[in-house]
Amino acid sequence: MMESRGLGPSGRSPTSRAGQREPFRLPVSFGGGARIVVMGALLAVLVFLAFFYESSTTTVGTGSAVHDAWEATPVPELDPALLAEASDGTRADRLTTEPQVLRHLLEKSLDVSPAVARKLGMPERMVSVASLRQSVPTYRGRYLWYKGRLEYRSPAKAGHPVSGYDYYEGRIRTAAGEEVLFVVSVPPDEEVRLGTWVRVEGYFLKLRDAHLPEPLDRAPLLVGPQLLRAYPDWQAVDALEPDVLARVRDGEWADGRLVPGADMDKLLAESQDVPLWHLASYAMHREATESAEAWKDVPPFVTKEQFDRFRRGEVPKGERFRVMGTFILARVMPADVNPLGIETWTEAWIQVRDLGGKTIPIWLPGRVGREWKRNQSVICRGFFFRRYQYRALEGQVRWTPLFVAATLDRFELSGDPLTNQITYAFAGLVLVVGLVFFFMTRRDRREHQRHAAELVARRRRRRGRADPLAVAPAAPHLGE
């Protein structure tokens, strides 16, 4: 019986009759030409990996790289039982304020910073007074805000629950003509006078009616820490004013070196002023009115020569660039009161491979989505704001151009065109060489087969001739 050359039932290789283990054999075999092609392909892969493949030391992260500045901030907790004592169902209820509830909110509101206010869920847009009146139980105890002109402010009043504080009552009128009452703990700044624009943030206590100094009907009452200086809403900035951007002192180039300016190391929280608002409004306007096609001819920020131009101060503030790279991280923080209605700012960092892996900061009005992950490809349409000096994680003081953009967008990073062309040309050359070897090997194999067939035919012809040394068969005996 012929032995099988496959694996036996036990999964082990069978042995020969002589007791020797036979070598393992693949179930398929390759001819000489196929082996040449496989070897050529392996050679091509090895050469590509050695000379053309750029291995990435980082991978796209699995978690969000966007962090809120108020994530770890503790928030005060209100007493639901005390809040339940507030009543505004009738006019008699609305003519008075429950003193215990007021004292409770005055005490708790002192612990509310801008970051805490965001964590408390303060909305980014004003809740209309009409909507609030329709859902008073829903909004009671919520942290809200309103902006308008200051119409009344009382002198300091005693009776604050926290020692060392007085409280101040007042009224504002919004741009829509809605009246809002407030009670705050911190005395307003000297610049806050009657008729100026202010913003009040605080816990919504109840609806109030009043006879004096003017009649009021169901006006919201907020209890917060202080009045904030505000601004009337701006129209969108559709043209940059160089004089406004020139107020930023970001150093100068002198004697072959960069001399830092007073504003060069200011963080985003410290830079929220007219120049930043001006450029941010312009960026948002361009984003809303221009298509992506209009940016195709805008130069990308990818060369060392461009970087040196920023260093020497040769790039005008407000000039636009396409900044492309990989997303590293972003931090969302509360915005100061501003004329653009911006409630949060985002500071994002992008690593630009073409600049040797340098990280570039981007300031964005609003917040980016938490779906952003580390090392995702990103592009932004940025406007140069100023030179920015910062301290790296290693402790070194560095500087970089700082851009303002309206949004961040994803895109696929493409390789260097020249590298791609060389790679494709090399792959084509290897393919051609492999095909040449294949056809040469097939031709040699056919010649070998033809020569072997001729030898066999020649032997057969020789066997067919009479052999003179052969013995003739014996004749049969008679009688058999």
Image (cartoon, rainbow, N blue to C red):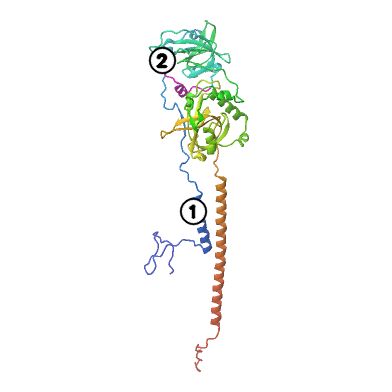
Q: Name the residue carrying label 2.
A: 107
Q: Within 10 angstroms of label 1, few (less than 14), some, or many (20 or more) residues?
A: few
Seen at 57% across and 66% down, the residue is 443
Seen at 55% across and 56% down, the residue is 430
Furthest residue in direction bottom, as rendered: 478
**Quadrant of the rendered structure where residue 445 is?**
bottom right
Instruction: Say if mark 1 contacts mark 2, CB within 8 Å.
Output: no
Q: Position of residue 43 (x, y in %)?
A: 50, 56
Residue closer to the observer: 409 or 272: 272
| Residue 370 in view, yes or no | no
Q: Position of residue 375 (x, y in %)?
A: 49, 38
Under circle 2, the secondary element is: helix
Q: Disc 1 residue type?
A: Leu
Placement of 414 over or under 200, stated as above or below = below
Is 76 displayed left or right of 479 in the figure?
left
Report if residue 115 lies within the magenta region.
yes
Q: Within 10 angstroms of label 2, few (less than 14), some, or many (20 or more) residues?
A: some
Under circle 1, the secondary element is: helix
Residue closer to the observer: 347 or 370: 347
Furthest residue in direction top, as rendered: 212
Magenta segment range? 107-124
Q: Position of residue 330 (x, y in %)?
A: 48, 32
Q: Disc 2 residue type?
A: Glu
Q: CA distance from mark 1 to mark 2?
A: 71 Å
Placement of 462 over or under 309, stated as above or below = below
Residue closer to the observer: 132 or 278: 278
User: Which label is found at residue 269?
Assistant: none
If you read the primary sequence from the N terminus, does the residue marked by circle 1 or circle 2 appear first?
1
Q: Name the residue carrying label 1.
A: 46
Seen at 48% across and 51% down, the residue is 50
